Amino acid sequence: MTVPKSHPRYESLMKRDKIIEGIKAGIVAEAGLIAHGRGEAFDYLLGEKTIPEAELAEKIAAYHLLLAENPVISVNGNTAVLVPDELVELSKMIPAILEINLFYRSDERVIKIAKLLKEHGAILVLGETPDAEIPGLEHARALCTKQGTIAADVILVPLEDGDRAQGLKNMGKTVITIDLNPLSRTSQVSDVSIVDDVVRALPNMIKYMKNARNEGIKQENMRKEISGFNNSKNIKKILRQIRDIK
Ligand code: PTJ
């Protein structure tokens, strides 16, 4: 189906199309469509735009990643088809390792996602041959690599399930998540919960990284901003906004 650019829901329809094509290509899990729909519902409630609380979390996340010693960006099927260029750009800017981690894991999907990221410019993508596990998880999300997830001090996990976010927290990592649902366990357990569409969140994080570099923001100033950030207060503000919609 060709969607005219003039259609009032053009952006939204294009995102759906990417997810559907991703399923046909064997990159996105079928459940990815359901996850996307849930995300859309929360996006409606947030006005389909980046709210100030998300903008703040995106800046804090960018600072965390810039200050990290071993930053890792986790990639799943939905994220790979929605923002492949941005994942690669972000990973090169920081620089951070890209590691594929899937809930509905199959070797075929992992290989296809790695290929897609490489077509978009990624040099190294981990996850095809996991050699470690996140303790306490009894599903495929536990599979990871020593070089990536295990060594990470800061990890960005877009469109996550709460189990792994908690598992990563238990390992002492700084966990940054992107999830449009502020009530999800993922959002509730993270250090920095970005309640925004991944399609808007990644470009914003890239923008804050560029600003930090261009304006020469000192590491100590980034640390100050990080320590002044209160994630649970930020989430509560978002929930209040949703509750007060007239
Ligand atoms: O590729 P796989 O096998 O790892 O599977 C990926 C999915 C997303 C299918 C899997 O992790 C899953 O089932 O996730 P959940 O438990 O449905 O959670 C996904 C969360 O992402 C939900 O809370 C949605 O609100 C949120 N979400 C969906 N689309 C977006 C989003 N958040 C930000 N941006 C989106 N575009």
Image (cartoon, helix red, strand yellow):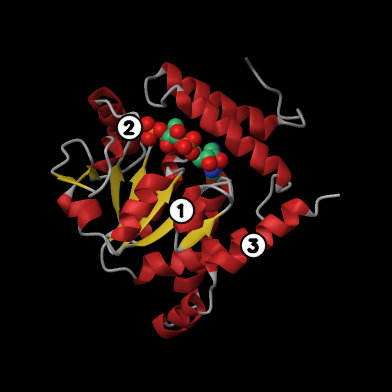
Left or right: residue 200 compared with residue 3: left
Count every numbered label the image shows and give the total.
Answer: 3
Which image quadrant: the N terminus? top right
Mark 2 vs mark 1: in front = 1
Q: Is residue 74 above or below residue 63?
A: above
* Residue drawn at the location 51% of the way across and 21% of the way down: 20
Secondary structure beneath disc 3? helix
Disc 1: which residue: 177
Instruction: Return the disc, 2 or 1, that comes first in the chain's sequence.
Output: 2
Mark 2 and mark 3 lie on one chain; the one further toward the N terminus is 2
- Kindly identify which numbered label has been placed on residue 113: 2
From the image, tell me which residue sits under label 3: 236
Mark 2 is surrounded, within 10 Å at the Cα level, by few (under 14), some (14 to 19) or many (20 or more) other residues, namely many
* Vertical side of 29 occupied by 153: above or below: below
Asked which quadrant contains residue 241, the reply is bottom right
Q: Which amino acid lies under the numbered mark 1 shown in the image of this protein? A: Thr
